[in-house]
Amino acid sequence: MTSPLRLGIIGAGRMGITHYSIANAHDHARITGVADPSKLVTTMLGKYAKVGTYKDFKGLLKGEELDAVLVCTPPAFNPEILDAVLEKKLHAFVEKPFMLNSVDGDRFAKGFDAAGLVNQVGYVNRWNDMFTKAKAFVEDGLIGEPLRFRSEMFSGTIVRDVGEAGWRASHANGGGAVYEMASHAIDLINYFFGAPDRVGGTSLSKVYSKAVEDIVSSSLFYGNGLAGTLYVNWSDASYRKPTNKFEIFGKAGKIQVDQHGMKVYLSEANDAHGLKQGWNQLYITDVFSSVPFYVRGIEYTAQLFDFIDAVRASKAGDNAPTRCTFADATANLKVMEQLFADDAARIAGDAA
């Protein structure tokens, strides 16, 4: 392909503007239209960026000739949007958690795949070099057979009573710590090991929120004996920025990794990877992959460039799988649904 892909953005909030800047940095893509209900946002983009602007996705899809869309709206709106996108046969990148239930997730995963359309969800940790390096270590058998894991995420997102205002205060809009943050921690588990067979001992706790959970705690179990814990707290004021932590214990060692660094403990030295017996420390600067444009983190550019390259490959007739498909995101939704159901069963049991 010689002409650049024509991309549209639906939802020009924080992530929409982030993706706008990244996509326009790709040599073979450009944003040609943006849909957002904010007149201020669309006026500014229309005046200074010279792109087509629309108040909603219907206007965008009707008014622009597009190859793909970047959907950055609250998940409650996404079924209607993706029905229209699928009808137009456009490739789609959607911000997580993608949908609010796995039934819709399955429907769109099957629909986009059947239509031969590239589909990707923005679980950005799959493009973080520390997590991809840790996954490669596990797959190479560096720490032996994995036995236990721990996936955690922390932030100071909700550190006071904000009442019922805003989308974060309602599950119906994709709010709550499960959809907003535990989804990332769950995705790392599924990325490393696949979806668990069951969850148990789930506790969803409120700190400041009235209608949604602020703390998520659960255990996850696999038929092969692998097990782990999930702990997420978005009301922890000791964290300035959202932080993912992942730990895997194996028969021959242990890995502790976050977005910026990794500690590896080995019972024996591994010459192939240049790692000694005992503790080894790796930093993001030791393993990072280069990107031509940096916004918020290398992984944000890497994920969107992968999507654009997959669309270009698809249009050229090549198979173009992505690192996080609609099906992958749906697997995360199924775990989230298990958490909600397990917590509800616990509460009902306590009441009885």
Image: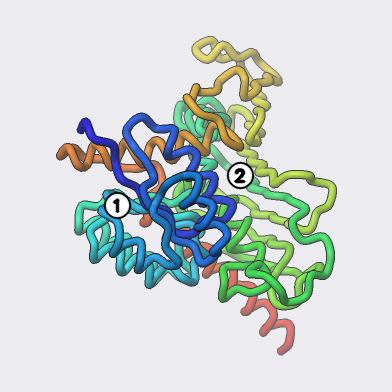
Horizontal side, residue 31 vs residue 143: left or right: left
Which quadrant of the structure image shows residue 270? top right
Q: Amino acid at mark 2?
A: Arg
Is residue 274 among what the camera can see? Answer: yes
- Residue 156, percent from left and from top: 78, 53
Q: Above or below — where is 33 with respect to 212?
A: above
Nearer-the-camera pick, 158 or 229: 158
Left or right for 1, reference 341: left
Q: Which mark is residue 148?
A: 2
User: What separation in Å lies between label 2 and label 1 (alpha carbons)?
Assistant: 38 Å
Q: Decide if residue 224 is in sight here.
A: no
Percent x, y for residue 210? 75, 77
Q: Look at 56% across and 56% down and name the residue there.
A: 13
Q: Secondary structure at mark 2?
A: strand
Residue found at x 63% / y 35%: 259
Q: Which residue is mark 1?
A: 91
Frontmost of labels 2 and 1 is: 1
Looking at this view, name the residue that lies furthest to the bottom: 352
Residue in front for this viewpoint, 167 or 144? 167
Q: Residue furthest left?
A: 317
- Give residue 18's quadrant in the image: top right
In this orientation, which residue lies closer to the viewer: 42 or 251? 42
Q: Quadrant of residue 215?
A: bottom right
Image quarter of the C terminus: bottom right
Give percent across and percent down for residue 342.
Answer: 60, 72
Residue 348 - label? none
Secondary element at image label 1: strand
Instruction: Say which amino acid is labelled 1.
Output: His
Label total for image? 2
Q: Residues within 10 Å of mark 2 (few under 14, many from 20)?
A: some
In the image, residue 171 sits, relative to residue 215, either above or below, namely: below
